[in-house]
Amino acid sequence: MTPAPSALSVEQSYAWCEQIARSRAKNFYYSFLLLSKPQRNAMCAIYAFMRYCDDLSDDETLSDRASEIRTWRADLEKALGGETSMHAVWPAFHDAVVRYKIPHEYFFDMIEGVSSDLAPQTMETFDDLYRYCYRVASVVGLTIIHIFGFDDPQALVLAEKCGIAFQLTNIIRDVKEDEGLGRRYLPAEDLRRFRVVSIEGSAEFRSLMEFEGQRARAYYRESAPLLGLIHKQSRRSLWALIEIYSRLLKRIEASGYDVLSQRVRVPTWEKIWILVRALGK
C-alpha cells in the first residue's frame, strides 16, 4: 500500500479525501452529498482516515501489518498535535477535527478495533461482539454526529446504538467473506444456541441469521430518535444513511438470509432514489 503524496495544503488534502470517499465509500458517500460543502469535506476527511485504518488491517501484501498500524497510530498523535506532513489525509483530517471539536479518543478506539482483526477473530458472547462493533462502527457514528451537530447529550448514546445496527448489518452480509479470512464475528454462544456447527446453508444457520437480523433491527429502532436530535440542516443526510443501511438489511431478509451464495447489495439506482426522497425531507 503506497501512501499518497505528503505535505499537501488543506485544500489539496480535502480534494484527495473526497476522491477516496467517492471511489470507496459505497454507502456513505451518497449521504455526504446532502450536506453543506464544509460538512461534506469533513466527512470525506474522516472517512479517508478510517478507510486507511481498515485497509491496513486487511492488506495481506504488507510484510508487517502490526508495525504499519503502530506507525499510523504514532502519525495520528502527531497529526492531532498539528504536524500533518506524513500523509495526504492529515491536513484535512486535522482541520476537520479542530473545526468540529471531535474528541480524539474515537480515533484511537478505531485503531484498536482494526488492530484486533490482525489475528483470527472469534467472539464468545454478544458482549464481546458489542465491544468490537463499538470500536469499528459506533466510534464512526460518534465522530460524524459532531459534524452533523447536536445539543442534547442523548445523541451520543443513540449514535452508539446506530453504529451497532450498521455493523451488525455488515457482519450478517459479510459472514462468508469474513469466515474465509478467519474472522467469525457471530458469537459462539449464538452458534451453540442454534446448533450451528459450520457456516453453511442449513436450516439452523438460517435461524441464526434471522436472530442476528432481528437483533440488528432492534438497534435500528432504539437509535431512531437520533434523527430528531441532530441539527436540522443535517437530518436529510443522516436519514439517507440510515435508510440505505436499513434497506440493506431488508434485502438480506427478503433473500431469506441467503448470504452464502451472494453478496447482498443496495443497487445504485435505489441509493439515488433514496437521495431524491431525502431532498424532500
Image (tube, rainbow, N blue to C red):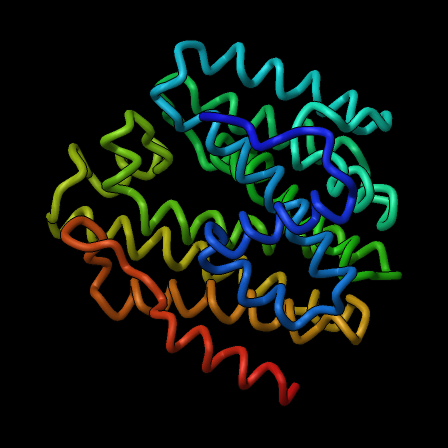
In the rendered structure, the answer to whether residue 153 lies left or right of residue 168 reads right
264 shown above or below 24: below
In the rendered structure, the answer to whether residue 49 lies left or right of residue 78 reads left
Total labels: the figure holds 0
In the rendered structure, the answer to whether residue 172 lies left or right of residue 165 reads left
Position of the N terminus, as image quadrant, is top left
192 shown above or below 2: below
178 shown above or below 203: above
Q: Position of residue 137 (x, y in %)?
A: 56, 44
Q: Position of residue 60 (x, y in %)?
A: 34, 21
Q: Position of residue 76 (x, y in %)?
A: 72, 25
Q: Position of residue 96 (x, y in %)?
A: 79, 46
Q: Residue at x 41, y 53 (%)?
A: 169
Q: Residue at x 79, y 57 (%)?
A: 154
Q: Residue at x 60, y 62 (%)?
A: 222
Position of the C terminus, as image quadrant, is bottom right
Q: Residue at x 47, y 68 (%)?
A: 244
Depth check: 157 or 40 in front?
A: 40
Depth check: 243 or 189 in front?
A: 243
Depth check: 219 or 26 in front?
A: 26
Depth check: 18 or 156 in front?
A: 18
5 shown above or below 275: above
